[in-house]
Image: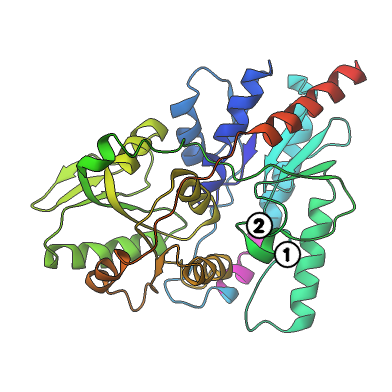
Amino acid sequence: MAPLDWGLGHASRCVPIIRELLKQGFEPILGGTKESLHLLKEDFPDLESQDLPAYNIQYSASDEQFMQLVGQAPKVLSVHYAERKLFKRLVQENKIDAVISDNRYGMYSKKIPSVIVCHQLSLHYPDTPDWMLKFSNRTNRNLIQKFDECWIPDYEGEKNLAGKLSKAKLKIPIRYLGPLSRFEALDTKGEKAEGKIDILIVLSGPEPQRSLLEAKLLNEIPKIDRHFTLVQGKPGEGMELKGENLRLVPFMNSKELQKAFQEARCVISRSGYSSLMDYEALGINQLILIPTPGQPEQEYLGDSWKEKQKAIVQTQKELDLKKALEEVVELKESSAISNSGEALAEAVAALKEQLLSAK
């Protein structure tokens, strides 16, 4: 099980897949980098793990990310090559039966069943020339189609959460798993009614934008007569700090974060897709989204949720936290989705059947 190290979202949405693999008798090996493995090992401390090459994508401090990302293309290709070389050796040495890769395009093999987990089948870059967008989408789909099957963490049809991002025709079989979240629906009759956490802020994503948003929030928080709990999204770093109206926590594991969501009156975060799947599963009613500047997917998803009146959306550049907190109480009530996990269970069972048939 190998998630991409582009923020923690890819690793977090692998948690329900790993749970289902264990339930059906698999012995997963966790593949990742320092931060992604830290998150996964918190939930699965007894599983074997394998260090994978780190992409370490760096964002620009400005809102213009395109050229910054283009400039890192040689490094990405180099890591992709190293990833392919390492995985070939792992398949040979560890007798791996199958691989499930979350957006790690180099983690496939023609010798074993190879599954890619991906919701971004159609890339969306506003203000991009048509020829460049077509080239990017063709390249993206060619990489996906090197795998034997694509698992899409979304609903099929009108109920889908990712909009046009998760819609595309592929030459390989696809399975819609429904939203993947490591959390379960909240018991709104319990601790949530107590409101033990007033405002919960959950940060994530590549630097330096993660730290830039944190700095802006820490500048505004003292001016607001509310109490904040800020989870920095920094696994294995620092220690918890408490101020007059702020509790600063470097990292929370799944169980701790589930409890925090249950106690929170309002949640503030990026609009990454994995986070949105969590909020949909939890039925979060007061939600403020701040897309990562220059990241088209998050901007698109933020706009989509704003249109559906599921969240208040502000840009990082024009962040007005006090105004957002005044507006968020006007959002309509939402209930947690009912996702039984049947589609995921069926996908894992089909993979198991394929392996048994091969033997």
Question: Going by the image, does 289 lie left or right of 104?
Answer: left
Can you say which quadrant of the picture contains the N terminus? top right
What scheme was used to colour the molecule?
rainbow
Secondary structure mainly formed by the magenta segment: helix
Can you say which quadrant of the picture contains the C terminus? top right
Residue 324 quadrant: bottom left
Question: Going by the image, does 112 lie left or right of 133?
Answer: right
The amino acid on which the numbered mark 1 sits, given as a three-letter code, is Ser
Asked if residue 74 can be seen in this view, the reply is yes
| Residue at the spot 43% in from the left edge and 48% down from the top edge | 283
Residue 76's mark? 2
Magenta segment boundaries in residue numbering? 68-75
- For label 2, the SS is helix
| Residue at the spot 39% in from the left edge and 38% down from the top edge | 186
Badge 1 crowding class, 10 Å Cα cut-off, few under 14, some 14 to 19, many 20 or more, is many
Residue 285 quadrant: bottom left
Magenta span has 70? yes
Badge 2 crowding class, 10 Å Cα cut-off, few under 14, some 14 to 19, many 20 or more, is some
Residue 48's mark? none
The residue that disc 1 covers is 122
Question: Going by the image, does 281 lie left or right of 188?
Answer: right
Say which label, 1 or 2, has the lower sequence index.
2
- For label 1, the SS is loop
Give the alpha-carbon distance from disc 1 to disc 2, as whole Å.
Answer: 20 Å
Q: In the rendered view, tell whether residue 170 sits above or below residue 311.
A: above
Location of residue 102 in the rendering, given as x and y in whole percent from the top left corner: 66, 44
Location of residue 339 in the rendering, given as x and y in whole percent from the top left corner: 59, 39
